[in-house]
Image: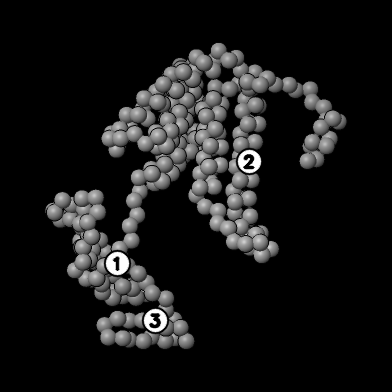
Amino acid sequence: MLYAIRAGSVKSESTFALSSRESMLLVNNIIFTVACAMVLIGTLYPLVMDALDLGKISVGPPYFNALFVPMMSLMVIFLGVAAFSRWKETPVQLYVSKLWLPAVLAIVAAVVTHWIYSQSIEPWVLLALVLSYWIVFTWGREFIDRLKHRESALAGLSKQSRSYYGMMLAHLGVAVMIVGVAMVTIFVEHRDARMAPGDQVEFRGYTFIFDGAREVQGPNYISDMARVRVLRDGVPYREMFPEKTPLYSPWYRHDTGGFTAWLYP
């Protein structure tokens, strides 16, 4: 607001074109600011409504998926374009010559990866893979271009600053995050089942057999450990031993048969 009010009196001798690294940084800041506002409103609005006794509302995945995902997708697209942006001005022909190959490779790699993983095509997963590979291939090409102007690859690697490698690592982290979020959102299946000792549950070719639970003594706690045998297509696959530590009090302990319960005073 202060910058907007004083915009007429603030003078700058520096100028930059629309297609420049300055513009990419500006777009980056705008997108992150809008995304931050989306999260802030979605988090605080239900609390404000409840505090003013205006009713209870729930803001969940539909809200964030409808607003946050498109903004982040747009940010990733500009992230790849920024790899070849220059200060002051960048010719459009440079963008076209540098970006067409990473774009094609990103689409091809995404389709192949998705098909190998699931033998099907999910549009949202495909989009996430395209964006992820887009980051990898655009910044990978930018990295290769830096090495081509050196006398050797080793010399080029040693000439890059630590901040540059940090930036590359951060961008690769964004690519990994995109794939992780998409895979978990689309492909993970969750099922709750109530099981008694001897019960079994079938799930996507796996059989989970609950053999019961027993009390185990840890170094500074007592927990209930279950034994679950897993069969894959009827063949023993592995065993799992999940544990649950009940709430306890250091003052009182109550034994009920073979089960130990910790009680608060």
Mark 3 against mark 2, which lies toward the viewer? Answer: 2
Measured in 3D between alpha carbons, the distance from the residue under mark 3 to the one under mark 2, in whole angstroms, is 49 Å
Location of residue 97 with respect to 194 vertically, above or below: above
**Three-letter amino acid code of the residue under disc 3:** Trp
Q: Nearer the viewer, residue 183 or 226?
A: 183
Q: Residue at x 35, y 48 (%)?
A: 188
Judging from the image, what secondary structure is the residue with disc 1 in? loop
Measured in 3D between alpha carbons, the distance from the residue under mark 2 to the one under mark 1, in whole angstroms, is 44 Å
Q: Which residue is mark 2?
A: 34
**For marks 1 and 3 on the same chain, the one whose residue lies earlier in the sequence:** 1
Residue 92 lies left or right of residue 144; in this view the side is right
Residue 35 lies left or right of residue 255; in this view the side is right
Q: Residues within 10 Å of mark 3 (few under 14, many from 20)?
A: some
Q: Which residue is mark 3?
A: 262
Location of residue 152 with respect to 25 vertically, above or below: above
Judging from the image, what secondary structure is the residue with disc 2 in? helix
Q: Which residue is mark 1?
A: 194
Mark 1 against mark 3, which lies toward the viewer? Answer: 1
**For marks 3 and 2 on the same chain, the one whose residue lies earlier in the sequence:** 2
Residue 102 lies left or right of residue 117; in this view the side is right
Measured in 3D between alpha carbons, the distance from the residue under mark 1 to the one under mark 3, in whole angstroms, is 23 Å
Q: Nearer the viewer, residue 120 or 248?
A: 120
